[in-house]
Image (cartoon, coloured by chain):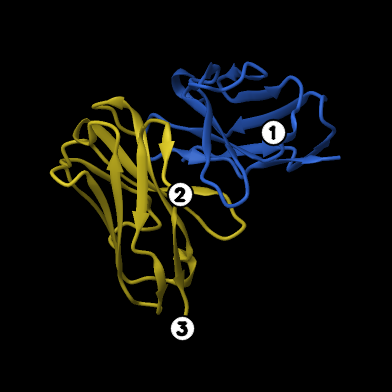
Amino acid sequence: EIVLTQSPGTLSLSPGERATLSCRASQSVSSSYLAWYQQKPGQAPRLLIYGASSRATGIPDRFSGSGSGTDFTLTISRLEAEDFAVYYCQQYGRSLGTFGQGTKVEIK
Amino acid sequence: EVQLLESGGGLVQPGGSLRLSCAASGFTFSIYAMSWVRQAPGKGLEWVSAIIGNGENTYYADSVKGRFTISRDNSKNTLYLQINSLRAEDTAVYYCAKDPMTNGVLDYFDYWGQGTLVTVSS
């Protein structure tokens, strides 16, 4: 099973700042089958990025994904009020995929 | 508009059973794989089970294999999860989620339901 480790656990930033979230896999993720989700309290996760770098429909371009192999990054270029949430990475493509433990982006 | 509406959660004693349902609308249900993903209170996400569009192939996490059964009724656009021999550690919000690709499986999820809470406690 591929284990995904997200860092940091919590990111304290102000609106307008840049957020950089990391997701590291215990072994190489094939074909960059890596997705990112945003989850707000009491809500279901929302797909942001798939294929490591493709934005899902309706996702603002301030969200971007990058990386390959075992190291992946989600970047939010300028945080807006609605971006403060928990973010999860997920690897998929072989057997049931796995999720990282999440990074909480909170208002500083 | 794609909609996924889960139901069937509740409070159940250890060792008990429940059947969760997920009513789907807004897309051609029969050609998309569907999954159940759960989230324990205050914890992360765990992919529990998946089923391909025609229902012939199913997949389970080791933690639920032999206790959970995923199925679907394409005539009713409904996904099910039969959960037996429930344990305290099965307490979670259970989400149904849709595969993004026609006739795909084991992909990411483009739509999620709002979830249904299962609480296992005596």
In front of the other: B19 or B47 = B19
Q: Residue at 21% of width from left, 43% of height from top?
A: B77
Residue holding disc 1: A83
Q: Residue at 70% of width from left, 23% of height from top?
A: A76
Residue holding disc 3: B122
Density class for disc 1 (Cα within 10 Å; few <14, some 14-19, many ≥20) is: some
In front of the other: B99 or A100 = B99
Q: Which chain is blue?
A: A
Circle on res. B69: none
- Give the residue type at disc 1: Asp
Residue holding disc 2: B114
Q: Quadrant of residue A19?
A: top right
* Colour of chain B in the image: yellow
Chain to which the residue tagged by mark 2 belongs: B
Q: CA distance from mark 3 to mark 1?
A: 39 Å
- Extreme-bottom residue of the structure: B122
Callout 2 touching callout 3 (CB < 8 Å): no
Question: Does residue A91 sit above or below A71 in this rendering?
Answer: below
